[in-house]
Every structure is written in structure tokens, then in C-alpha cells.
Image (tube, coloured by chain):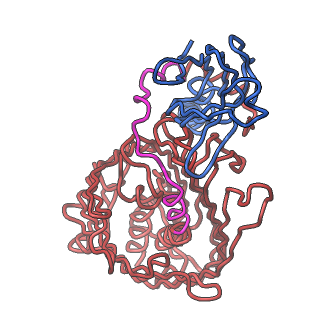
Chain colours: A blue, B red
Amino acid sequence: MKRVLPLLLAGAALALQGCLFSTFLAPESRLQLENGTHQTVAELEAFGPGDTVLLLGDTLAPGERTGARTIDLDGVFRLRILTGDTSCFRSGCAQWSDLGERELGGSLRLRLKADRDGLFLEER
Amino acid sequence: MRTPISLHAARAALLPLLALLAPFAPPASAGVPMTAAGIHRSGERLPADLAYGVERAFSVGQDGWLAVHHMAVVSPESFPYRSDLGLHHGWPFRQSVSFGAMRAFGDFAVDETLGKTPHRRTSPQGWRGGLFFSMERRGWDNEDFLLVRPGGDQALGYAGYLFGALVDRPKTGLQFGAGALARSRLDWVPRDGHEDLSEWTGWGRVGFGAFQSWILAGDGVRGWSVGLDLEQRSLEGAMVPGFARYLPRVRLEAEELADSLRLEWEQPLWDSRLYARTLWSLDEGFRWGELAFWLDPSRFFGLAATWLRRDGDDLFGGRLRLGLLEVGYSYAPDVESLGGMEKSVYVTLGFAITRLSEIWYGAPGAGGFASGIIDDGGRRAERKVR
């Protein structure tokens, strides 16, 4: 049994490696967004040429932030955000802004900010 | 998020082990992303790989065996998957299990030259019959899993199941087999319904001495292979095969996907330790080449370097076998059969237990079958009895 035990332990570690690494290195993806602009934010999406996933659907007034939400994405994705003022969401003048690629995974706290070049996300 | 198996207790118990291993994890985002096209290519190869694995297991006429094989990646960033949405971190998987048993009818010959047990060997003089089962699943999932099928949003993969019956006559090397192969998709397309994507084909096999063959046929012929396994090896000071250890292993296989033929040639170069192996396609020419060195013919320890040519690009890789563990990096046969796994490190654990002429053997079993000691043990026992 003494000879077999190390083998069994090594086998178990390998067999469970995915679970182990996902527990300690890649835990559940969670995202919290704070609106640091003077516009109202409606939706945050990950998008690609053939697919779109809604990450946050909260309406955030300037200065507000969402709770930490679980998202089913872990990796590098291109994000876009829908912004405008309150009347825009009714009249259709809200605009999508491309936020570029960002790595998602683990617990992320992001703040949406604006400068002369447009909107961008910074990690808090 | 779905949890594949309940592991709270195991996680707690293995925490110290993981803490020790964590510093050795390679940097993130090192590997080339897997793609849907590559994984579908891998699924197309799965039936042929299963049939070939069973051929290798049966070609030596063992009494029974159990083989398991599990591939592991060192971090979820090692081999990401590129979808239409972006780059997903997750887990490529390849797992296989194979077992079978043969029962002999009639008389046995006893090999007295090796003395009494544990070295005494017997060999059936008549026919044998048996059953076997072999399965493998491969693909990519954004969640890791072991025992349950993947079901993540980005899961993509295939499972194959080959089972059947075999009769053989070890004294002459004559073998016949028949069975069925089922292949199913592990992802669910369309996602809103669990559509049954299984397909069935029949499997047949004939072997006679060095000649080995198999065929997969359903509505039409889905694949076939014929080969000559001429090389002989020796182990543990058994009789040396002489010039036969420099004879090649040659195989011609129909490629269903490309509607072409592929030729595999393995040439022993030095003393059952150094080998050159290459794969050529009738349409595409050179596919890959391998130079493998084994520390001894049992193949417990070895090193291999490979050169893969694909769409005009060259990819160099290798594999290190340390007992039951193998460490691979862009290893050409794996890149081809898995439709990816490039430019980052992965590990495989393979173990096979085989009963041969009343003796149990353990061996590395990467790919689901012991590639070294089974072959050698079988041939040696046969030669000694004659």
C-alpha cells in the first residue's frame, strides 16, 4: 500500500487538476462597474463578429455602481457600453462605445471614465 | 456556474499539494488558442484513433487489460479557445479508458525454459474468445470536469465508444474481431435542446502475424487501415530478436475527412531504443516526423522531438516520458489528433495493467494503451513457447 499511495495521490492530483486550478487560480468571474462619467450607462456587453453576451444590464446614473455580478465569461473579450442621458434611452439617441479588449476573470471592479478620446475602463 | 463534481473534501485535502505546485505553473496565455475547426477535425479523427488503439492492444494477444489515460493542462490560460465572442480561458480535455478480457479454450503449452513461477509462462494452443470496451473523449470546455460530460456555454468536443468481441488463436497469430463504434458530440447544438448527435458505425478487424487491419463501415466504408508490424523487441534479458528488431512498422490508412490516404512508417534505428517515425499524406505530402529515444525498450523513460508541417508552416515540438507521466510541447501526433495544443506545456498520465501469459504487467499507457512492455512481452512469450 505504501508503494501505491504516492501513485494514487499523484493520479488524484492530476485527475482533479482542473478543479483545483479553477478553485485557486481561476475562481468564478465576478464583475462590478462604477459609472465615473457624466452620462447614464445602460448596458455592458462582450461582443464579437458572431456573438454577443450581455454582462451588465443595470441602468447606472453618474456616480452609481452596480453590485458584484457573476458573469459566465473568463478570458479576453472586446467590450462595449451603451450610454446616453435618460431621454436618450427613450428617443433612441443612446450610443454604443467600443471599450476595446479586456481580460475578464476573477473578481473585477471597473470604473467607467471619459477623456478627450472617449470612454475607457480602469481597474479599481 | 455548474460544478462538475463535488470536491470540497478533496480540495481541502489536496490544498498543501497544490500550494507546492503553484510556483511551477507556467506564465499565462502561452499557448495557441484552440478553435472550433480544430476540435471538429479532432472529432473526425477519433474513430480512427480508437480503432488503431484497439489494433495495437490486440496485436500482441494479451489475456486481459485495463488502461486509463488523462491529459491535464497546467493552467486555464495554457490553451484558450477562440470563439466568435473572444478568447476563453478553460480546459482542453482528453480522457480514455479501455479494458478487455480473453478466455482460452483447449490445451495450454508450458514454457519450461524460464523455470517455475513467477517466470513460468503458459500459452493457449487453441482458440480464445473475449470482449473489450474502449472509449475516449476529447475537446475543450470552459469548465473542468472529470466524471460528467462537459456542459459549459463554450463546451465543444466528441466522445467515442468502441466495443466488440474478438476471437484469436495465439499460436498462429490469427485474429478476428467485430463490434460497433458510437461517436457523439459533447456540446449541445442547438443550445436550447439536447439534440442527439450520436452516430454508429460497425467495426471489424483481421490480424494474422505481422499483418494488422481494421475497417469502420456504416452506410458506406468510413475508414480502414492495413499495416505490417514487423519489428520485434526484447525486454529484461530475453532473447534478442536479431535483425527483426530493425524491421519497420508500416501502416496505410484511409483518411475519411480528406478523402485521402495516409502512410505511417516507424523505423527502428538503434537497438530498440532509437526510432524515426513519419506520417505522409497522399495529397499533402509530408505531415510530420519524429525522432524518439527510449532509455530502454520498456519505454518507461524517453524523449522525442517532432517536426510538423501544416499549410507550409513548420512547428517543432517534443515529448518527455517520465514513467507514467508525459510532458508534451507541440508534440506533432497530439497536435494532429487534438486539432491544436500548440506552444504550451501539457501533461498526460497514462497507466495500463495487462495480463499476459499468466503474468501481470504495468506499463505507461499514454494514448490508452501500453506501448512498450505489452508488445515486447507478448512477442517474447510467443517465441519462447514455439
Residue B301, horizontal then vertical, whole percent: 34, 46
Which of these two is toward me, B258 or B3? B258
Q: Start and end of the magenta stretch? A: B18-44
Q: Is residue A66 left or right of residue B312?
A: right
Res. B37 in view: yes
Q: Is residue B33 magenta?
A: yes
The residue at 63%/26% (across/down) is: A27
Quadrant of the rendered structure where residue B200 is?
bottom right
Question: From the viewer's perspective, is residue B292 above or below residue B287?
Answer: above
Residue B220, horizontal then vertical, whole percent: 60, 89
The residue at 71%/60% (across/down) is: B189
Res. B106 in view: no
Question: From the viewer's perspective, is residue B164 above or below residue B274?
Answer: below
Question: From the viewer's perspective, is residue B240 above or below residue B222?
Answer: above
Q: Is residue B276 left or right of residue B182?
A: left
Q: Is residue B210 magenta?
A: no
Residue B45, horizontal then vertical, whole percent: 51, 68
Residue B129, horizontal then vertical, whole percent: 64, 78
Question: From the viewer's perspective, is residue A111 above or below residue B381?
Answer: above
The residue at 65%/66% (across/down) is: B161
Which of these two is toward me, B261 or B257? B257
The residue at 21%/61% (across/down) is: B271
Q: Quadrant of the N terminus of chain B?
A: top right
Q: Residue furthest bottom?
A: B220
